[in-house]
Image (cartoon, rainbow, N blue to C red):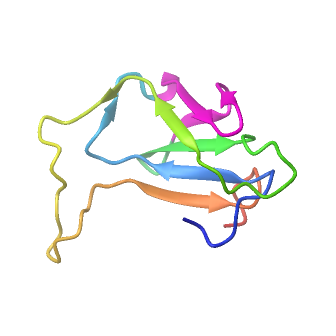
Amino acid sequence: MPINPLPADGSVKILLSSSVDLKDKENTKCLVTTNKLYADNCKVVKEDDKWYLKITGVFATSAPYSSEIIIMVQDVINPVDNKPELDDDDKPVNGFSIWTYGDENMEYG
């Protein structure tokens, strides 16, 4: 949980785990619920050979957003073996990563 709540124009970027696959990649639908359901504010994008969810424009209130965020992704294909791949220090190497930003252009983390 971030120390500082997200501002109204904040955004979120999530690196998808390499252990899951998306049936239709760029055309995958994702929905986000904050204070209401948003259908067009979540995009699946590829950057540097990795797949991300980019979420913008879902923090509509003027007060900083500190409530629950629900993300639903369509047609995710889970692996046959969902145990994480571990590095030499027994830490997962194929998990999800999340970044939060104070702007919609994802410039200010």
Q: Which residue extends farthest bottom?
A: 89
On screen, residue 36 above or below 63:
above
Q: Is residue 59 left or right of residue 85?
A: right
Q: Quadrant of the C terminus?
A: bottom right
Q: Is residue 17 left or right of residue 37?
A: left
* Place of residue 30 in the rendered image (x, y in percent of width and height, measured from the top left): 53, 29
Q: Which residue extends farthest right?
A: 62
* Place of residue 11 in the rendered image (x, y in percent of width and height, measured from the top left): 68, 51
On screen, residue 97 above or below 53:
below
Instruction: Look at 50% across and 57% down and name the residue there.
Output: 98
Q: Is residue 43 magenta?
A: yes
* Place of residue 62 in the rendered image (x, y in percent of width and height, measured from the top left): 87, 51
Q: Quadrant of the N terminus?
A: bottom right
Instruction: Look at 84% across and 55% down and name the residue there.
Output: 63
The answer to which of 23 and 95 lies nearer the viewer is 95
On screen, residue 79 above or below 2:
above
Q: Is residue 94 left or right of residue 31?
A: left
The answer to which of 45 and 1 lies nearer the viewer is 1
Instruction: Look at 19% across and 36% down and name the residue there.
Output: 79
Q: Is residue 18 magenta?
A: no
On screen, residue 95 above or below 88:
above
The answer to which of 1 and 42 lies nearer the viewer is 1
Q: Quadrant of residue 107?
A: bottom right
Count all numbered tags in the image, as a single digit: 0
* Place of residue 54 in the rendered image (x, y in percent of width and height, measured from the top left): 59, 43
Q: Is residue 30 left or right of residue 91?
A: right
The magenta span reads 26-45
Q: Quadrant of residue 51?
A: top left
